[in-house]
Image: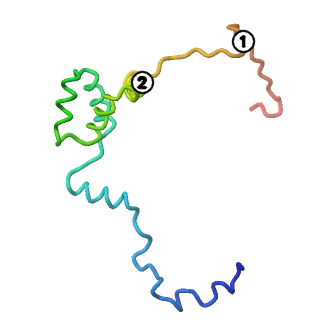
């Protein structure tokens, strides 16, 4: 049963060990980010990511196999190269790369007018006119 009787006598005054004296615990990912930044690691910038994708477009299959052996290469880059070797993932990745590097192709969309110009009437209320 909800109510005051359920929590009566259970506050910090009767259980001081429940007080969180250090405050709210920090998020785990923030702590990890701080620790790895101290080691000199950083997240790839958007420019780094797109530059790498552009380089991948010019690599041969042999280049990619050789670069996969480089243990000093950031893991995200090795994963991306590995995924490009999978035919099912390759099409999706390549579509994303092309869309990101060059922008999506413009698509004309006309669902209401059969190609005719749409006439728009604007009605202005005289009371709200500035």
Helix, strand or loop at label 2? It is: helix
Q: Nearer the viewer, residue 104 or 129?
A: 104
Q: Nearer the viewer, residue 111 or 60?
A: 60
Disc on the earlier residue, 1 or 2 = 2
Residue drawn at x 31%, y 34% is: 80
Name the residue carrying label 1. 113
Residue 65 at x, y percent in the picture:
20, 29
Residue drawn at x 44%, y 70% is: 24
Q: Based on the displayed image, in which of its 4 quarters is residue 56 positioned?
A: top left
Residue 101 at x, y percent in the picture:
37, 25
Name the residue carrying label 2. 95
97 vs 39: above or below: above
Horizontal relation, residue 112 to residue 108: left or right? right
Quadrant, the C terminus: top right
Mark 1, Cα crowd under 10 Å, few <14 / some 14-19 / many 20+, is: few
116 vs 29: above or below: above
Q: How many marks?
A: 2
Q: Nearer the viewer, residue 86 or 43?
A: 86
Residue 61 at x, y percent in the picture:
23, 23
Please tell me whether mark 1 or mark 2 is closer to you in this view: 2
Helix, strand or loop at label 1? It is: loop
Horizontal relation, residue 9 to residue 52: left or right? right
1 vs 83: above or below: below
Quadrant, the N terminus: bottom right
Residue 83 at x, y percent in the picture:
33, 33
Q: Based on the displayed image, in which of its 4 quarters is residue 72 positioned?
A: top left
Q: Nearer the viewer, residue 94 or 90?
A: 90
């Amino acid at each position: 049963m909800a109510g005051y009787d359920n929590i009566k006598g259970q506050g910090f005054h009767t259980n001081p060990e429940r007080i969180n004296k250090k405050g709210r615990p920090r998020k785990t990912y923030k702590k990890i980010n701080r620790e790895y930044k101290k080691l000199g690691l950083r997240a790839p910038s958007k420019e780094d990511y797109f530059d790498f994708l552009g380089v991948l477009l010019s690599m041969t299959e042999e280049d990619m196999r050789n670069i996969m052996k480089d243990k000093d290469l950031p893991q995200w880059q090795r994963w991306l190269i590995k995924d490009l070797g999978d035919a099912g993932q390759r099409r999706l990745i390549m579509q994303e790369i092309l869309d990101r590097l060059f922008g999506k192709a413009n698509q004309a969309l006309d669902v209401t007018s059969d190609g005719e110009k749409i006439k728009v009437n604007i009605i202005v209320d005289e009371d709200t006119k500035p």
